Image: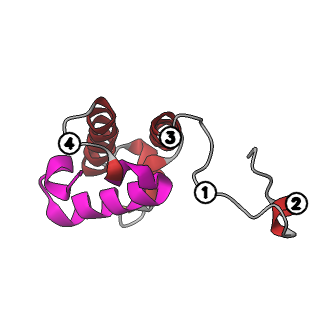
């Protein structure tokens, strides 16, 4: 199981990164310790953590010149793009089919709203 101390040294930030990642790809909690999937997930999470602590231009939401202020985006913005796709790809490969985990009853109307193939 991936824990906050595996992600980064600042506990609160590492926990928040891990929580957001679990929201994107819940399967990361089920990877076996030392598995390739866990190592890949940790690489992604550590990169996100490092980017957040560096607070690069990617996270600047707005800035003002008069009285010099910079506003940063939310932690979730650190997952925009490649990190989100990569985490979801890990979950897709771990369930063997590339499909969402779970199913909807075929005899109920909800099966027409969200077909199993998606």
Would you say 68 lies left or right of 96 here?
left
Q: Position of residue 48 (x, y in %)?
A: 34, 44
Could you tell me residue 91's position as x and y percent? 48, 42
Q: Which residue is mark 2?
A: 112
Secondary structure under the numbered disc 1 in the rendered image? loop
Q: CA distance from mark 1 to mark 4?
A: 24 Å
Count of numbered circles on the image: 4
First in residue order: circle 1 vs circle 4: 4
Cβ atoms at labels 2 and 3 below 8 Å apart: no
At x 33%, y 54%, the residue is 29
Identify the residue under disc 3.
95
Pointers 3 and 4 in contact (CB under 8 A)? no
* Residue 67 drawn above or below residue 58: below
> Disc 2, disc 1: CB below 8 Å?
no
Kindly give the residue lying farthest to the top in the view shown: 36
Label 1 belongs to which residue?
102
Q: Residue at x 44, y 56 (%)?
A: 26
The answer to whether any part of residue 27 appears in the image is: yes
From the image, tell me which residue sits under label 4: 33
Rendered image coloring scheme = secondary structure
Query: Tag 1: Cα neighbours inside 10 Å, few (<14), some, or many (≥20)?
Result: few
Looking at the image, is 90 positioned above or below residue 102?
above
């Amino acid at each position: 199981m991936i824990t906050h101390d595996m992600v980064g040294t600042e506990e609160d930030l590492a926990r928040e990164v891990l929580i957001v990642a679990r929201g994107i790809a819940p399967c990361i909690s089920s990877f076996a310790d030392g598995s390739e999937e866990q190592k890949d997930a940790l690489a992604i999470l550590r990169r996100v953590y490092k980017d957040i602590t560096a607070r690069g231009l990617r996270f600047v939401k707005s800035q003002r010149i008069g009285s010099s202020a910079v506003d940063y985006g939310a932690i979730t913005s650190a997952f925009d793009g490649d990190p989100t796709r990569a985490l979801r790809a890990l979950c897709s490969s771990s369930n063997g089919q590339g499909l969402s985990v779970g199913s909807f009853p075929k005899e109920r109307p909800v099966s027409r709203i969200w077909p199993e193939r998606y």
